[in-house]
Amino acid sequence: MSIASNASAGAPRIHLSQDMQQIIYRLLAAGLLCLALSLATDAFLTSNNILNVLRQASLLFFLASGLTLVILTGGLDLSVGANIGLSACLAATVIKATGSPILGTLTGLATGCVIGICNGLMVAKLRIPSFIATYGMLWVLHGITYYYMAGETIHGFPPGFRQIGSGHFLGIPIPVYLMVGFLVAGTVFAQRTVWGQQIYAIGANPVAARLTGIPIDRRLILVYAFSGAMAGVASIVFLARLNSAEGDIGEALTLPAIAAVLIGGASLFGGVGSVFGTFIGALILTLVLNGMNLLSVNANWQPLVTGVIVIFAVWLDMYGRRKA
Amino acid sequence: MSNFKILAAALPFAVMATGAMAADETIAVFTKNQTNPYFQTVRVGADAAAKSMGAKVVHYIPTKPDSIPEQLSQIEDVIVKKPSAIVFVPVDYKAMVPGVEQINDAKIPVVNVTDRSAGGKFLAFVGADDYSLGLETARYLLKEMGGKGNVVILEGVKGSLTNVDRVRGFNDALKEFKDVKLLASQPANYQRLQGLQVMENLMQSHPQIDGILAANDAMAVGAIEALDGANRKAKVVGINGTKEAVDAIKANKLLATGDYNGFLQGCIGTMAAIRALRNETIVTEVVLKPTVVNASNYQPYDRPLESRACPSWSEVEAISTKTN
């Protein structure tokens, strides 16, 4: 929280109050969830489980943090899940073929980034609505990945590489460090840099943004490239954690990633939202699964419970803002 | 022939023509998706059978995994193209009945494979019994545990036919072992990542877990990663007999995998279709007995699918339950 408030302090006044309000109510929702879970089971509030939840939230956060910037511009990137699939499969192939985790990692990151740049070019230069451009990209990527993998999996990576996903440093999982790093970097970028503020401005009022001379095309390409690159990061952590690549690994993550951004307070119309809010969103979604597993909620009820909690978390924010 | 070329050009990712044999008999093979390795084994089995009998196979696979509307429209396409016969895995055993009726109306002979259709007329059914697959695999684990200890179940997609039957088999096996305690039965939706995360969560609330019953191999392998990450040991079984599971058995990480015999199903389904076209005797029902693949019998599974051969017809008759 200190990260966000420090960062917001330097931002224009209007962002400070909006962000603070949102973040307080999002934190309240997450806090209530934690309180309920710690009352319900002793297994919840242990350092082991907290680290466990943070590590689980990291994958979703990587994906959702890049997506946050896209949504801030009023766009959407539906291809992030399919992007993870292809990036992970290509990275896995390179690691297997060359034995070099570094080359594999670079392949994954580059694949993700190139896909993002393609999305950005379609949106900025060809003026294709982002929903359609990235939805089309989703199918193209699935097509390539499924054809390439033909239902096979690639598994078994070097122990050094696996540290990225399953290693610890000073008792804290490596993905948690990565998450904190990207959280700080993303927050500073969005709140404290000129480019970050231009991204907010594009989403808040595209016409005004254009008139003030913001290079809209270049900023749009940048945010889609970021989103793609973060999918690349997620694909590498995914590989390192699961020790295995298959074509459909990211498919189940697209909607939760979008949900994490929106639960975190962003608006699909653009201009509103924050990377920190997205972190809280990813955390809430992860806590729901963690809590249901700890409490052994019957499998039949789990989808219903998830739905109710997501709606409640956002309602709490809306209710709080009306009161305020 | 030319019809199929046009189709292959129009739907590059949905349809992949295989088998270069010049033959009059064309078998259209419908499977559920390109992502689950199981259906790849069915397709390779179908290809092997057709190749050995001198027929041609065209595969129809929904681009969106398990898509009901897409498989329905593929049926409509196929009825226009008029293949000699169809080998059909319904994406949904109830929802595809109208599609099967269309095939029946078009008088194209059709063999039902894997999931038994709730309606329509078929030459034969070839499948494996998910219930006994779950039962036998679970019995093997519980025996290996010495008939005592704590187990958890990782369930597949709620409401899918395979999952309902497999989990019922698991639970019935558990009833035979009074000293085994079922700690939790939680859904991980046949997904590797969810298998890992659900297992990580369950380990928080259950300090002693001795056995894990996973309804497919991907979840089993995900659960093994979770155990490794926490430096804990448990005996794990999965279902499907995938290459990855066999590798895990060789590495002494997975205890066993129940084999669904997708390759055999593809073989027998396609052989039955071709034999019917040639007015040779066929069997009307083959329900394959489960094989529990473990460290003592994995050798036949430890080689590429493409190098396996279909059984002879007399062997098929020996395992069939109904003939005509």
Image: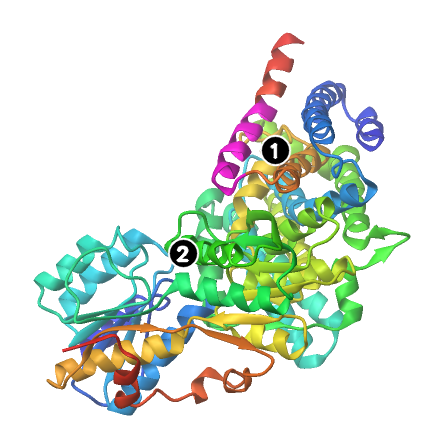
| Most foreground residue, B228 or B293 | B293
Highlighted range, magenta? A298-314
Other-residue count near label 1 (Cα within 10 Å), few / some / many at <14 / 14–19 / ≥20: many
- Type of secondary structure dominating the magenta stretch: helix
Tell me the number on the disc at residue B165: 2
Residue B7, magenta (yes or no): no
Image point 47% across, 60% down: which residue? Answer: A142
In the figure, A151 relative to B68: above or below? below
Tell me the amino acid under the disc marked 1: Ile
* Quarter of the picture holding the C terminus of chain B: bottom left
* Quarter of the picture holding the N terminus of chain B: bottom left
In the figure, B33 relative to A55: above or below? below
Tell me the amino acid under the disc marked 2: Asp
| Most foreground residue, A149 or B183 | B183
| Residue under pointer 1 | A202
Image point 40% across, 56% down: which residue? Answer: B165
